[in-house]
Amino acid sequence: MKLGIPRERHEGERRVAATPETVKQLAGLGLDVLIEARAGAAAGYADHDYADAGARIVQDLDPGELNVLVHVRPVLPSTAAALKRGAVTVGMASPSSELATVQALVEAGVTAFALELVPRISRAQSMDALSSQALVAGYRCVLEAAIRLPRFFPLYMTAAGTVPPARVLVLGAGVAGLQAIGTAKRLGARVSANDIRPASADEVASMGGTFIKLDLETAEASGGYARELSADRGALQRELLAPHVAMADVLITTAAVPGRRAPLLVSRQMVQGMRPGSVVVDLAAESGGNVEGAVPGEDILVPTADGQGHVTLVGLKDAPSAMAQDASRLYAKNVANLLALMVRDGTVAPDFDDDVIAGACLTHDGAVRHLPTAEALAALVPALPDHAPRVQGDRVQNEGGI
């Protein structure tokens, strides 16, 4: 079976879905690995290293020739339509925002596995790309803040006087938030954090941070993810956080709700209440932003309330791609480990009785297997009997087009 690794064409994307190490793993499973020329160049992986690992280098990858396509960014609808029926894709799919691609995958009869859907169970940890990429992003966002902050992170005691440590506040204590806490602590900052999940307090403490407890309802959904607060509780959360934000030299926000717009945690007024020279890094800027006014990929100078200076608001974009080599190393291993579950004697044959494989499957045999995506897709289809998708349990069988 032919497995293809394309050169990512999304603007700013430098990662690649396979490394020479994982090519060896995939070739060892009996797959014929094809990689597009210079697919790994931006991440520091040369074509000759892939060739030495057992891959064939092709100038242009033809999706129609492939049995398996592995990717980083969601495939385009045109690429999905070009795949042969029964082909398999593995990669990030962003199904809630890429419904046109989901529809194209359904119509093409492609079996698509979305790494965002990998169940959060112990057996699947080695395939959890959300966690591996969040780790990279959490590390990177602290470095971005440190570069912009006009003072030191650590305590310095010198003959010329004592420099106090910077105060860093992290909102959201998932994988990215915990990595941000640990990185800021290693740089010598005084770190505090908040999360609406009560179980996060021990995790924050284990990374060396101080947990800020607010008088709010708990908000933990299945799988350990946070769920969004109601509007009135969200307003109360911002009110309770305001004094902590005002005391911080650096604010890092990492809160996300899977499949939903990022929750608003920090208002513009809260940012203006910070000291001049402070830095805010919004890691959720690409999914709507935790901070009012954050723009993905831009630094915005927000005037402080006292008129004495400004706060730098950083809308972080493509954070894992900024550290493409190690981000690719981790991501490629997630992809290869998931594929290893499906390959038997050189053939990709998914066993849908396996909870990991079934949970990660987005489309199969002309159907959407992920219920929330199926419902979102159904809402876009004209309400006509000949076009409406038929929902059956956790599947939707497509009987028409958008």
Image (cartoon, rainbow, N blue to C red):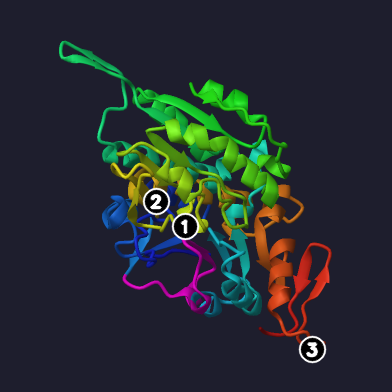
Which residue is nearer to you in this view: 160 or 365?
A: 160
Residue 229: x and y, percent?
68, 47
Which residue is nearer to you in this view: 345 or 281?
A: 281
The numbered mark at residue 286 is 1
The numbered mark at residue 308 is none
Residue 223 falls in which quadrant of the image?
top right
Q: In this view, does 220 lie above or below 293?
A: above
The numbered mark at residue 316 is 2
Residue 324: x and y, percent?
35, 49
Q: Is the magenta stretch mostly helix, strand or loop?
A: loop
Of the two numbered discs 1 and 3 on the same chain, state the one appearing first in sequence. 1
Residue occupying the far front of the picture: 306
Describe the element under mark 1 as helix, strand or loop.
helix
Read off the residue under disc 3: 386
Q: Whole-Å distance between the Cαs marked 1 and 2?
A: 8 Å
Task: Write the start and end of the magenta stretch as one range.
Answer: 59-78
Q: Determine crowd level at label 1: few under 14, some 14-19, many 20+ residues with C-alpha closer than 10 A.
A: some
